[in-house]
Amino acid sequence: MSRVVAVLSTDWLGLRRACPRRSDEELVALALQRGRAVAAREHRERVEEDLPAGERVSRLRDALAQRVASVAGHRFELVTQRDRLARAKVDERESYERHLALHKDLVPALKLQAKELRAEVRRLERECEAAGIDPETVEPAIDWSATISVDGYEPPRYGSNADRRAAAIEFFRRVGWGT
Amino acid sequence: MIELSPLEEAMASVGDATVPDDVVALELPDRLRPDGSEAELRHLILVGLFDLLAEASLGVLPSDAEREALLMGEGWLIPRLEADVAAYRARIDSLRRALEAAPR
């Protein structure tokens, strides 16, 4: 009997769009073969500066595929267990969000700037309403759904990789993943 | 409007846990000897999936420097955030002008 593995449609459709000429069967086989090949190669967190450019690109590509796959795997667990996790406490959700932010190694300064500006936009919109101005008549408008959500963003405050690891392990232990 | 590559699209949204919970059941060919737990196999498929997205995205870039920038994350996050910041600033300027022009 064939093995069946589930992935989120969101992830699979991204691949389908990027490779429209290949069938699902081809893509499944190719993805598994590629995944094995990447996983079999030596993986280092840091890519040396003095490597030839092509070699650096190759190593960065391997590292990125593994890192993003790790985040996507966590997302799969979260999304498919959403009902259970919806009962989790607010602080656990925040821990998860911090965990994702750490994995994605985002750029805190720009995110904080965006967060402050979003708050300022909303404050001014309220001020306009209080002054009798309909903010929706003022251009340019912002398509909030197309922006990166940073309202709840706080920069990571972990001091070391050991702290990060401990925080992530503690979070997954509390929400019961892997048990 | 910033045109994102397939890899950038995926990286920009991979942390979004509000996506629909629809799943695709992928049947793995026996000839590939798919051993291991479902979670292990899913991880390998996702690694391969993102590697294929990287291949599709890097192939159109003209230099290793640009490929490296994309893989380091500079290719999607900073332009996206900078575009957001510019939009917020434009909105703030116009809201302030509207407030200044409003009768008191």
Image (cartoon, helix red, strand yellow):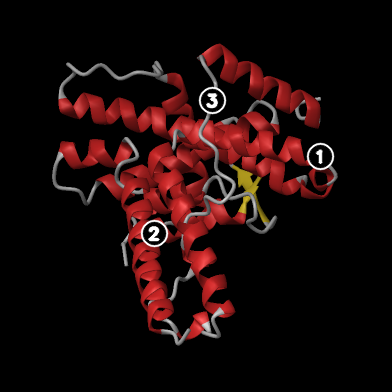
Residue at image point 37% right, 57% down: B85
Quick one: which residue is furthest to the front in this view?
B104
Q: Position of residue A176 (x, y in %)?
A: 81, 29
Kindly state the secondary structure of the residue where label 3 is placed: loop
Q: Alpha-carbon neighbours of circle 1 within 10 Å: few (<14), some, or many (≥20)?
A: few
Q: Position of residue A117 (x, y in %)?
A: 44, 56
Q: Which residue is mark 3?
A: A157
Q: Is residue B53 visible?
A: yes
Q: Nearer the viewer, residue A110 or A131?
A: A131
Kindly state the secondary structure of the residue where label 2 is placed: helix
Please say if the residues under marks 1 and 3 sit with CB atoms less than 8 Å apart: no
The span from disc 3 to disc 2 (Cα, nearest Å) is 25 Å
Which image quarter: residue B50?
Answer: top left
Task: Answer with left or right where residue A2 lies relative to residue A41.
Answer: right
Q: Nearer the viewer, residue B62 or A93?
A: A93
Task: Answer with left or right where residue A141 lies relative to residue A25.
Answer: left
Q: Quadrant of the N terminus of chain A?
A: top right
Letter of the chain that mark 3 sits on in the rendering: A
Letter of the chain that mark 1 sits on in the rendering: A
Q: Which residue is mark 2?
A: B84
| Amino acid type, label 3 | Arg
Kindly state the secondary structure of the residue where label 1 is placed: loop
Q: Which residue is mark 1?
A: A89
Q: Position of residue A26 (x, y in %)?
A: 47, 49
Q: Position of residue A104 (x, y in %)?
A: 48, 36
Q: Alpha-carbon neighbours of circle 2 within 10 Å: few (<14), some, or many (≥20)?
A: many
Letter of the chain that mark 2 sits on in the rendering: B
Residue A16 against residue A133 in the figure, above or below: above
Which comes before the other along the chain, label 1 or label 3?
1
The span from disc 1 to disc 3 (Cα, nearest Å) is 21 Å
| Amino acid type, label 2 | Asp
